[in-house]
Amino acid sequence: MATPDVTVMGGGIFGLSVAWACLCRGARVRLIETTAIGAGSSGGLVGALAPHVPEHWNDKKQFQLDSLLMAEAWWQQVEAAGGLSAGYARSGRVQPLADAAAVALAEARAVTAAQIWAGRAVWQVVPADRFPGWAPATPTGLVIHDTLSARMHPRQAGAALAAALHVRGAEVVIGRRAGPGGAVVWATGWQGLADLSAALGRTVGGGVKGQSLTLSHDARGQPQLFVDGLHIVPHADGSVAIGSTSEHDFADPASTDAQIETLHARAIAAVPALAAAPVLDRWAGVRPRAATRAPMLGPWPGRPGHYVANGGFKIGFGVAPRAAEAMADLVLDGRDTIPPGFRVEASLR
């Protein structure tokens, strides 16, 4: 390839998505990944793409809403270009309601959702028996059902993006056999946050380990569940993903332990139909979390021509389409549509 217009460092969901958005704008793109596509937290199992609760609205929530609404068309374009499925579906989400106070809060949020989502999706309180054999039993007999949440198979999504980049003529380099050229976007996960912190002389983020597993249970027609902080996500391949832990102190980023068995037991308690499902896979990895807990997008302070796309943490797949387009706006056109709270400088305050 001739000297690229944009070099993206990192083959996780942010790096791949930014590379794709820039390529679609006509830029010559080189992506450099030191290990393998999805080698970090983007190679996980869960893939729950869920909105923030519709209250106390802010730029972060609006950014995520915009991304979730554009995701279906965005991923269809990726799949059409590369010929691989990303495992995306806007399948919705169910959350159990434990008592009258929870029901009242959920109904109030339904009113706000109707205003903010403007008919593009629904947040509603419905009987749990609308999802027989799947929705957890609740004391109220009621659950929240939203139609905005989606699911994504993380590994398939990474492979689909890599294939689309290859077909459309981007240069994808595994290992540092090629140097950067043009504008450089750093999307290098939790280790990249450590490098950025060292360069700036201040901690701007770090890594949070997570563990998850998948079971062989075909529930592909069901919505994902969110039960007491636990994600239970049916995928199109006939598996159900369960996750995840949040571990700030860890010795081995890639090891699984007894905590994953606790996740498994909690999932069975919520959905007894999972009790007989064999375990297909167990996974552990470290998610990049910015100090602000928001994605970190924009210029690298004091380093002209260099940019940061990092800190996706638990919402990386959900915000990736909007984040990618915002980074392409900035890097290629000089048009800044990134919320102030997402900038690197926000973590320096």
Image: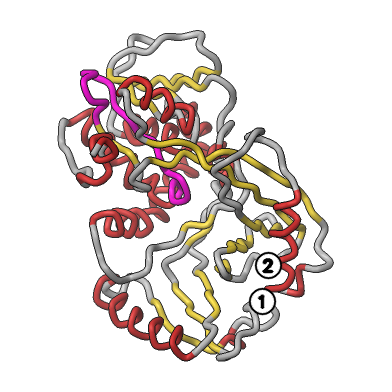
Classify the position of the C terminus by image quarter: top left
Classify the position of the N terminus by image quarter: top left
Provide the secondary structure element on which disc 1 rests: loop
Residue topped by disc 2: 219
Q: Could you classify mark 2 by the number of other residues whose Cα lies within 10 Å: few (under 14), some (14-19), or many (20 or more)?
A: some
Residue 170 in view here: no
Q: Is residue 204 left or right of residue 270?
A: left
Provide the secondary structure element on which disc 2 rests: loop
In the image, residue 122 lies at what x, y percent? 38, 76
In the image, residue 339 lies at what x, y percent? 22, 47
* Residue depicted at x 56% and y 38%: 286
* Residue depicted at x 23% and y 35%: 345
- Residue 46, compared with residue 250, is above or below; it is below
In the picture, residue 24 is in which quadrant? top left
In the image, residue 160 lies at what x, y percent? 53, 39
* Residue depicted at x 61% and y 61%: 233
- Residue 71, compared with residue 184, is above or below; it is below
